[in-house]
Amino acid sequence: MSPSYLQFDGLGRTFPGVVALDGVSFSARSGSVHALMGENGAGKSTLLKILAGAQPPSSGRVILDGQPVNFRGTAEALKAGVAVIYQELHLVPELPVMENILLGHAPSTFGFIRRGAMRQRAAELLKELGEEGIDPDMKTGLLSLAQRQMVEIAKALAWDAKVIAFDEPTSSLSARETDKLMEVIAKLRDAGRCIFYVTHRMEEVYRICDAVTILRDGRHVATHPDLKSVSRDELVKQMVGREVQDVFNHSPRQVGAVRLEAKGLLGKGLSRPLNCKVHSGEILGFFGLVGAGRTELMKLLCGIEKRRGGEVLLDGQPLPAGQVAAAIRAGLVYAPEDRKAEGIIPIASVQENMHLASRWRLKVGGAFIASKKEAEITRDFTAKLGIRTPGPWQEIRLLSGGNQQKVILARWMSGPVKVYLLDEPTRGIDVGARAEIYKLIQTLAAEGAAVIVVSSDLPEVLGLSDRLCIMRQGALVAELPRVEFHPEAILKTALPVELETVS
Amino acid sequence: MSSETATCSAPKRPKFRHLEQLSMAIVCVLVMGCACIFVDGFATIGNATGMLLTMSIVGMLCCTMLFCLASGDFDLSIGSVVALAGVSAVCVANAQNSVALGVCAGVGVGGLIGLLNGSVVAYLKINPLITTLATMQAARGLAYIAGDGKTVTASEDFAKLGGSLSIPWGSGHISIGYSVLVMLALLVIFGVVLHYSVFGRSVLALGGNEEAARLAGIPVKRTRLMVFVLQGLVAGLAGVLLAARLQTGDPKAEVGLELKVISACVLGGVALTGGRGSIFAVIWGMLIMGTVQRAMDLQQIGIYWQFLITGSILLAAVIIDRFKSKLG
């Protein structure tokens, strides 16, 4: 067994209001494939970004071949032989393959590129990967996705990368392309490289990986240097981790009439027509992995994306397709998953953000804003929801994630809302604030609203929901009442299909 | 600090929330103070009214450019629109023998160009820089076509619009140009609209985070269209007033005006990236630019040096803007 080549020592990374990584320590050997597993938001991407030099750690260090390294950019990481291959490939589509492969360090004399040498080097690297079929002169954008991935790997080899990390490399590959990639990865491993492999697919982990590290909530749960000795169930258990805590305090509520109903809904992100209902006083959970189509479904329901077919009924009344403002006026509101990009106006004040949507309601004299009334409402909600801010004038980006989320919830709560669609309402929010948000969601339901909670955090959806919908690959694959909530079964249902066919 | 200042106790809003506004106000006072001390003839009433008059065109357009920048866009066509509106207004007024029709034509043509800019940017999602660069050229061309390549002389009735209001002052009187009054009115109107109206807040929300604004049900496209239409209308009005004051419609008028206007806004602290801006920022920026310009004129600094100096000021302003947004 080879000695450990890459070591993480107490690695930590915090963002304002969020702890993404918390003292993670483990090591990986060269000549082996090391899987990195965990639920969404466990800290895998942050770890990769630190490894790639795209982000500095807040604490701790990375030790490469016995030497502590401190990359101040991806270029330094590449020079040290560390390459990360992200899900979205970083290639210039307009350039020929060879220029992409040698991007940033093309062979040159006095600043002039030696195209012959470049072509030869690119061809060599492609051959090493068994991709002689790719013409180095071809425009990169014309290649298939799998081929572009190979170009990306060749690019890593061109830097003589000793450590190559793959972030969900098979998510858009066919079975045959996956086989090919596995072969290449095995070859890279046998050549003595240290490979990281981030994936959700248990099947692939057992197929290609030698060791595994599991992260959860930014913390290191376990590293198994010998994967073969660990059972699949054990891994799932460690990934899900936490017991379903009693922060949820689930108590049955009065469930009333159907509030929102989707009939034969079709549109971007859905692979087949979808039907679902949510009742007054009910919390309906939506679980699935990233890319299962949950966010897309929410956007279709509230009219951000235009549906291609089917109907959405609110209290029996059809909603027009693709009109957010109409949905909001009718009482259907959406709190987006990506708070920073879609929820808040970062440089605007708390008050401004809170009243972003209710603008047309709080008016005096036609077009002008009832500022006093707004200030009053802001004060009320700040107190009621316990929003911690020095004042309503504070720029919202300076608040913690939990407090930002509360402001967004207040934005909707100040109006007559019938259905809340909450997409990952606690993403990036610390445990204490989470409990407050859970309580708030339960209050909303108890007051008669219908609430849909989308979450990738299994304990969270299990703790909150009265009923659970599971989505996989753009389709609703299961609907369970609360009595049938079994975490392991649910996670298995949510995992991509080919897993089951193999197991 | 968050723990004890939590929740509801009526929080005190800092007097000057945006430090940069305070800092620009100080810079403005300093610049004007220096001009008063070191430039002969600056600290006189006659100079002040003259300076306001030369600033008035830039000042009017700053009001709507503020909206444009706040929503995250640009409008480069305004200089050409001012010229086009002036020529059109004079031509129509002469042909129809009606000042009112002439004014309508000038303002209207500005509004139409604004409508074109806004539709292309908001609905076809074309980059505003390219769009308004194109309409800048096109409007300039139209101005030459309308005036047959020459300046058009305005009638005396029309020129009365470029007159001024006399206010008794001590033994004599001070005269304030109508275009100065219009500028002041627009500053007040657009200031109130930006800060207190639904439309104004939507513009800022749009510039701050378009996606969040859209998801909150703000009619993003319509808002953006409105901003460009307003910009066009105000440019049209400015063109009419300028033509009246100069008694000619000049197709060569105000080349490079758009850059002066954007410089003044940015200098005052309106963010180029959108989402941040206030009418005070515009006022400080305008006053600084106006003072520097006036001081250079009084000192008889050559036009070549003036270009160099105003260019340097703009560069300094955008570097400061970048620095500020980095700090934030």
Image (cartoon, grey):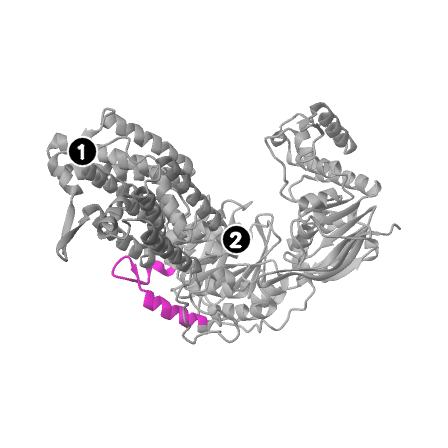
For marks 2 and 1, give the CA distance: 47 Å
Does residue A265 appear to the left or right of A375 in the view shown?
right
**Disc assigned to residue B326:** 2
Q: In the rendered image, is residue A324 in sight?
A: no
Q: Horizontally, is A40 left or right of B26 in the view? A: right
Chain of the residue under label 2:
B
Where A494 falls versus A182 (above or below)?
below
Question: Which one is in front, B43 or A425?
Answer: B43
Q: Is residue A219 above or below residue B262?
A: below
Disc on res. A173: none
Which residue corresponds to the image point at 23% horizontal and 24% vertical from the top-left? B148
Q: Toward the viewer: B16 or A192?
A: B16
**Residue A143 visible within the image:** yes
The residue under label 1 is B90
**Residue A307 higher or lower than A401, as above or below:** above
Identified at 37% across, 54% down, the residue is B28
Taken as a whole, is the magenta stretch helix, strand or loop?
Answer: helix
Residue located 61% across and 35% down the image: A92
Could you tell me residue A192's position as x and y percent? 84, 43
Q: Secondary structure at mark 1?
A: helix
The type of residue carrying mark 2 is Lys
**Mark 2 / mark 1, whichever is N-terminal:** 1
Chain letter of disc 1 in the image: B
Residue B274 position within the rendered picture, expressed as x and y whole percent measured from the top left: 43, 49
State yes or no: residue A378 in magenta. yes
Q: Amino acid at mark 1?
A: Val
Q: Is residue A78 magenta?
A: no
Instruction: Indicate the position of residue A496 as horizontal and vertical percent values.
Output: 66, 49
Q: Where in the figure is residue B230, as x and y percent of width and height?
A: 29, 45
Magenta residue span: A358-382
